Amino acid sequence: MLRALTLLRPWRPLGVRGCTSDGTSGGHEIQVRALAGPDQGITEILMNRPHARNALGNIFVSEMLDALARLREDQKVRVLLFRSGVKGVFCAASSAIMGLIETTRGLLPGAGGTQRLPRCLGVALAKELIFTGRRLSGVQAHALGLVNHTVDQNKEGDAAYHRALALAQEILPQAPIAVRLGKVAIDRGMEVDIASGMAIEGMCYAQFSADTTSLYVVLRIKPGPHTRQASTLPLEPHPQPQVMCNFFNNQK
């Protein structure tokens, strides 16, 4: 069955503060657009800092955090999709290279690289990639599970975006509370041991008949080297499922 044409609303800044890093008047590095029609509920965040190829500058990060904070309170937003306004950046081609190369420059991978990569690939492989500073192609990254999909490039150069949008469209009709609490259970459960994760899942399951805006999980866990003692974990009231456009375009 063919899907109805997606209706687009204009890009707009979402009450962001400050000025752009390049000093241009009235411009914004982070812009927001809500889709309409059959895709109502999908909101896109456009990252648009072309002169720095979307590098994470102070204004860029500030505007991003501001937009996310506001969208988090918008219950009309069901799925959040990140896309790049800079061609060839963020949603890169399969010929693009990625990696944590800081050790080749005498540095330590920052911004959580040493913590996120082992959680994604396992300790042994993460150490190999970080210790060697190895660079990976898009195809290699997909084979390792660093990106979700690879897609053939189209003439417009936005094949990766359309694949991400298709995934957002798959999520959109699903039960919103189930999707939200599923995200909470996964994200919070990955931060603790398996027994604690199962407890978080059970508490999230119980919230189907409760008010999710006041969801707080109190964990009472036996102390251990990989567990946390009695603690209160505030769970986001309306965590939006996010579709990062982490697909590689296969360029023939």
Image (cartoon, rainbow, N blue to C red):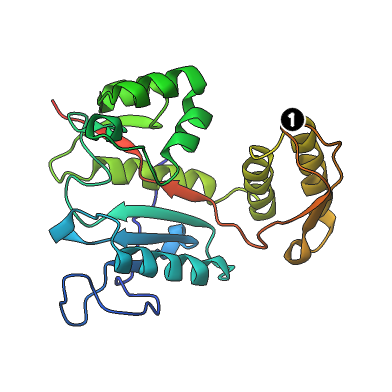
Coordinates of residue 98 in the picture (x, y in percent): 26, 33
Q: Residue at x 21, y 61 (%)?
A: 49
Q: Is residue 249 visible?
A: yes
Foreground pick, 179 / 188: 188
Coordinates of residue 231 in the picture (x, y in percent): 79, 52
Q: Residue at x 63, y 62 (%)?
A: 238
Q: Is residue 33 visible?
A: no
Coordinates of residue 64 in the picture (x, y in percent): 39, 64
Near mark 1 (Cα within 10 A), the count class, few <14, some 14-19 or many ≥20, is few
Left or right of 250 in this view: 31: right
Callout 1 amino acid: Ile
Image quarter of residue 23: bottom left
Image quarter of residue 48: bottom left
- In the depicted structure, whether residue 206 falls above or below residue 126: below
Coordinates of residue 65 in the picture (x, y in percent): 44, 65
Left or right of 213 in this view: 18: left
- In the depicted structure, whether residue 76 falls above or below residue 179: below
Residue position for label 1: 194
Foreground pick, 169 / 132: 132
Foreground pick, 55 / 11: 55
